[in-house]
Image (spheres, rainbow, N blue to C red):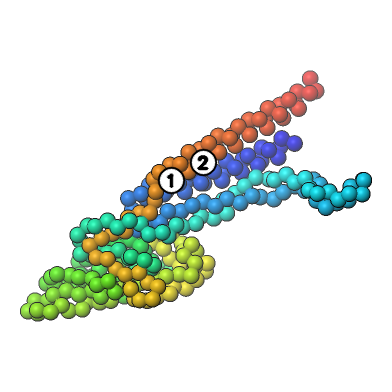
Amino acid sequence: MAIVALHSASTGLSALSTNIDVIANNLANVNTAGFKASRANFEDLLYQMKQQPGVETASGDQRPAGLQVGMGTRISNTQYDFTKGSPQITGRPLDLMIDGNGLFRVSIPPDRGNGVGYSRAGNFFLNSDGEVVLGNTTGSKLDPPITVPQDATNLTVSADGIVSAQLPGQTTYSQLGQLQLATFVNPNGLQSIGGNLYIESAASGPPIEGTPAQGSFGSIIQNALESSNVDPVHELVDLIKAQRAFEMNSQSIQVADQTLQVISNLRR
């Protein structure tokens, strides 16, 4: 009956609406440093089994295929694309980029993510206490914390994450701290909380921590930022496909409605 078509098409409209939301968020963050694009994954729903496959027919033969009618679709999950964004040279000594695997560790309120957030954005600042903080709304501090003295000059960050600077009266550089990175077995299980931050979840597994340029961890590039990895052309193509699919599902609803109207007019 056309009733099934109505319900199936309505699930398509709902799923495609969510897909358009995901694409719109990707396009909105095309200039967000370290942003990772997301993709909506679809899955089909339950099926009505009208004829079972493999059943013996009246002639003694075996039915080669059954008759199944699907009940629509839904969004199963959103999946991050963790491919590296292109480098953007800025010349700021506290702009840092991870060349390879890993995320920066920052401190967040303890009621979320056990007090530790993770980010690919490397736009760091100094707060009023000289602490290195992430350039988001809350100014999340690096974890472990690194403090730069007010009179320090020539701040440098090595490829292996050692933060150094020259202090007054010294001819050599003094080490101020060591950056730490983290990776996850399943980075797609990370939970986005806004502010360029992720927190771990049961799906992501616990963080694997280490130093930059060691093992599988990427190295640090100073004076550069990682651009968003959103491909605007690809997203616009996906947006057009989603729009056309939305229109076709709307057409399915109209056809189902016309069919029901014909049926209801049979009594006249």
Secondary structure of the residue carrying numbered label 2: helix
Looking at the picture, tell me which residue is in the foreground, 215 or 229.
Answer: 215
The answer to which of marks 2 and 1 sits earlier in the sequence is 1
Percent from the top left, x then y, of residue 140?
A: 31, 65
Which amino acid is tagged 1?
Answer: His
In the displayed structure, 247 sits above or below 161; it is above
Checking the image for residue 234, the label placed there is 1
Question: In the figure, is residue 65 to the left or right of 228?
Answer: right
The residue furthest right is: 59
Secondary structure of the residue carrying numbered label 1: helix
Dividing the picture into quadrants, the one containing residue 10 is: top right
Q: Which residue is mark 2?
A: 242
Which amino acid is tagged 2?
Answer: Ala
Q: Identify which residue is drawn at 40% across, 56% down.
A: 36
Percent from the top left, x then y, of residue 243?
A: 51, 38
Percent from the top left, x then y, of residue 159?
A: 27, 71
Percent from the top left, x then y, of residue 56?
A: 88, 51
Question: In the figure, is residue 110 to the left or right of 19?
Answer: left
The residue furthest left is: 169
- Of badges 2 and 1, the one in the foreground is 1
Looking at the picture, tell me which residue is in the foreground, 235 or 200.
Answer: 235
Question: In the figure, is residue 223 to the left or right of 19?
Answer: left
Q: Identify which residue is drawn at 20% across, 75% down.
A: 164
Dividing the picture into quadrants, the one containing residue 136 is: bottom left
Q: Identify which residue is drawn at 36% across, 66% down.
A: 100
> Is residue 16 at least partly visible in the picture?
yes
Residues under labels 2 and 1: Cα distance? Answer: 12 Å
The residue furthest top is: 268
